[in-house]
């Protein structure tokens, strides 16, 4: 499928693609290198899918960069990931501006090192006026954390009489999530051949299409991304309706 991009319908693109970037460690191990080496090479794949999304005209791309569970990994690996995050932001900021890409984050970012928070805040501010692709980094994120956080905030607002408990609806609950201003993903991609969601956007992917590939993240490139988009465009998304109802709309 070398010319897969030519088969993509530019009038039927997903608005939001989310990716679970998995396989850095296994990729590195397969060539006799450390996990840190895998993470560093995974940055190339981030660049590939970000450029591909911007070139196609996709509006939102969310990357699962660091979960709350990842804090349990060896300290050296965590330090490497945090240093890599800072260096990557500094290195790519000019590219984000050049390509009209806006940067956002979701997750418990207050738990990140102060230096990381500072660089993220600076990059978010610098790119805030960009109107092309919105690149969302999920950092210190887990869906269960997000849902519990939303419940606690709702409970606080009920106690303070900001809202009434009988007014709690799906729409209201969604406003308390960290993704409140981001549309739900149309497509969720997971690399590395694993078939699980890993506590990622559980509320938001209720009707997302799932795409799994055996490619390890550092090997995932633009063409792989285009294949996932093309696969999505050849599915029928029914949202609880029948095929006949969809055709008659």
Image (tube, rainbow, N blue to C red):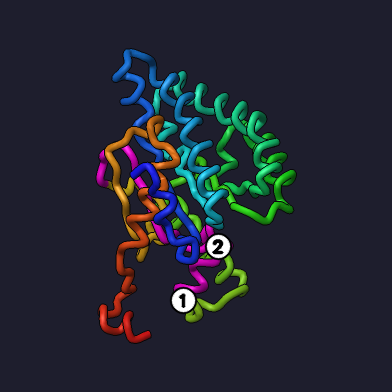
Q: Is residue 202 visible?
A: yes
Coordinates of residue 199 in the picture (x, y in percent) = 36, 48
Residue at screen point 57% across, 49% down: 54
| 218 over 16 or under it: above or below | above
Distance (Cα) linking label 2 and label 1 = 14 Å
Is 118 positioned to the left or the right of 153 in the image? right
Q: Is residue 152 visible?
A: no
- N-term-proximal mark, 2 vs 1: 1
Is residue 99 or residue 5 the one in the foreground? Answer: 5
Which mark identifies residue 180?
A: 2
Neighbour tally class for label 2: few under 14, some 14-19, many 20 plus, Cα within 10 Å:
few
Q: Main secondary structure of the magenta part?
A: loop
Is 101 positioned to the left or the right of 125 in the image? left
Secondary structure beneath label 2? loop
Is residue 106 or residue 13 the one in the foreground? Answer: 13
Residue at screen point 51% across, 50% down: 61
Is 53 positioned to the left or the right of 220 in the image? right
């Amino acid at each position: 499928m070398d010319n897969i991009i030519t088969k993509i319908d530019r009038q039927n693109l997903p608005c939001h693609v989310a990716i679970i970037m998995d396989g850095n460690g296994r990729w590195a191990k397969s060539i006799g290198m450390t996990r840190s080496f895998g993470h560093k090479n995974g940055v190339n794949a981030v660049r590939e899918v970000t450029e591909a999304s911007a070139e196609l005209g996709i509006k939102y791309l969310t990357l699962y960069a660091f979960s709350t569970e990842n804090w349990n990994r060896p300290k050296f690996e965590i330090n490497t990931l945090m240093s890599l995050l800072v260096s990557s932001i500094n290195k790519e900021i000019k590219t984000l501006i050049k390509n009209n890409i806006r940067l956002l984050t979701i997750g418990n970012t207050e738990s990140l090192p102060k230096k990381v928070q500072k660089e993220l805040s600076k990059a978010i501010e610098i790119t805030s006026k960009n109107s092309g692709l919105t690149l969302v980094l999920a950092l210190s994120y887990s869906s269960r954390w997000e849902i519990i956080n939303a419940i606690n905030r709702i409970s606080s607002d009920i106690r303070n009489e900001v809202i009434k408990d009988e007014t709690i609806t799906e729409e209201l609950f969604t406003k308390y999530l960290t993704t409140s201003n981001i549309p739900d993903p149309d497509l969720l991609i997971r690399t590395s051949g694993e078939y699980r969601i890993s506590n990622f956007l559980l509320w938001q992917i209720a009707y997302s299409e799932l795409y799994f590939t055996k490619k390890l993240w550092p090997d995932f490139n633009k063409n792989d991304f285009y294949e996932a988009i093309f696969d999505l465009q050849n599915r029928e998304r029914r949202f609880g309706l029948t095929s006949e109802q969809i055709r008659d709309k």
